[in-house]
Amino acid sequence: MATGQRLMRAIPVSEFGGPEVLKLQSDVVVPIPEEHQVLIKVPACGVDPVDTYIRSGTYSGKPRLPATPGVDVAGLIEAVGERVSAFKKGDRVFTTSTVLGGSAEYKLAADHTVYKLPEKLDFQQGAAIGVLYFTAYPALLHSASAKAGESVLVHGASGGVGLAVCQIARAYGLKGLGTAATEEGQRVVLQNGAHEVFNHREDNYIDKIQKSVGEKGIDVIIEMLANVNLSNDLNLLSQGGRVIIVGSKGPIEINPRDTMAKESSIKGVTLFSSTKEEFQQFAAAFQAGMEIGWLRPVIGSQYPLKKVSQAHEDLIHSSGATGKMVLLLK
């Protein structure tokens, strides 16, 4: 090892598998930023479902091993590459992507994926922005083309993306409805912008939603578990209604005729399909949201870095979880 190399704690994954492959190492070399990169000192890193798919090797775009899980990080700029002008050492930032993952004390990121983090938000909240809001915003306002005055149902609203959709919907003048499995989840959904909330563990909750919205139906449904809910979603839609699929854990049988009379549509979305220019547009809206106060990430369970395997285990088996799961590296 070369003299003067700095070492850090990190979770480099050398083989695909279950949570047990996530092992803390304390002798990982701190990387040096290239021309258009920044080095971030990371006190907080988000944990997302996509991290578990990448770790297990089931994600469509497998990383080259060894790789470090974690997409979202927030922290302080430690160093910048020679051609970086927008950031300097000490800036508070969050990212939408890192080079080889974020579960490490220091992480590289391309400068165009890094954004300023206002003092109003702490680093845990900063680590809960990227995947959640950069999924929720285009799903609601681009893919669904939702407009002020329309109604939106968030199926599975107490999770991180669901709460982000509720906040965005309220800020942009939509009537928000949400579903959640627990009393705590329902309370948090209402606190974060939804006008009404329903318990999706109740046998008759679909009837309650239909009674609430009346004959018109729901204009937009943001769906977190399509393999369970999609058939019901199609019956809840208004004329020209849209279902946007954010999450699904398997197949489902539907009747395509349910889309015909209402001329409804089903569309899937993914965070990683947005262009660099679109990310910049979304980020500008989020900067305004942070300053005004409607963008306020809800933090769920928090784990020290050494408990990352437990975090992945809990994420896989969680039911009715509220907010964003975060790793703490302080």
Image (cartoon, rainbow, N blue to C red):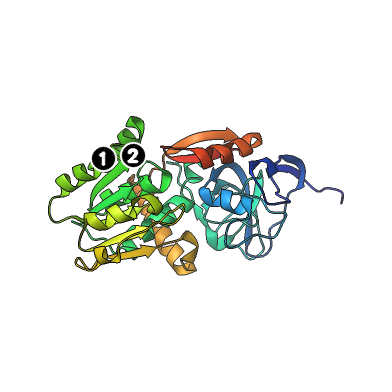
Residue 71 at x, y = what percent? 56, 52
Kind of element beneath mark 2: strand
Determine contact: label 1, label 2, CB under 8 Å: yes
Question: Is 100 situated left or right of 324 in this image?
Answer: right
- Up-down: is 166 above or below 253? above
Residue 145 at x, y = what percent? 29, 64
Question: Is 180 situated left or right of 67 in this image?
Answer: left
Residue 124 at x, y = what percent? 50, 40
- Up-down: is 134 above or below 322? below
Q: Which residue is mark 1?
A: 197
Q: Which mark is residue 291?
A: none
Instruction: Kindly identify the amino acid type of the residue bearing the numbered disc 2.
Output: Ala
Q: Quadrant of residue 268?
A: bottom left
Residue 102 at x, y = what percent? 61, 49
- Up-down: is 261 above or below 237? below
> Is the C terminus in the top left, top right, bottom left or bottom right quadrant?
top right
What is the crowding at mark 1: few (fewer than 14 residues within 10 Å), some, or many (at least 20)? many
Kind of element beneath mark 1: strand
Q: Tell me the residue at 33%/55% (across/down).
A: 230
Is there any visible trace of residue 311 in the rendered image? Answer: yes
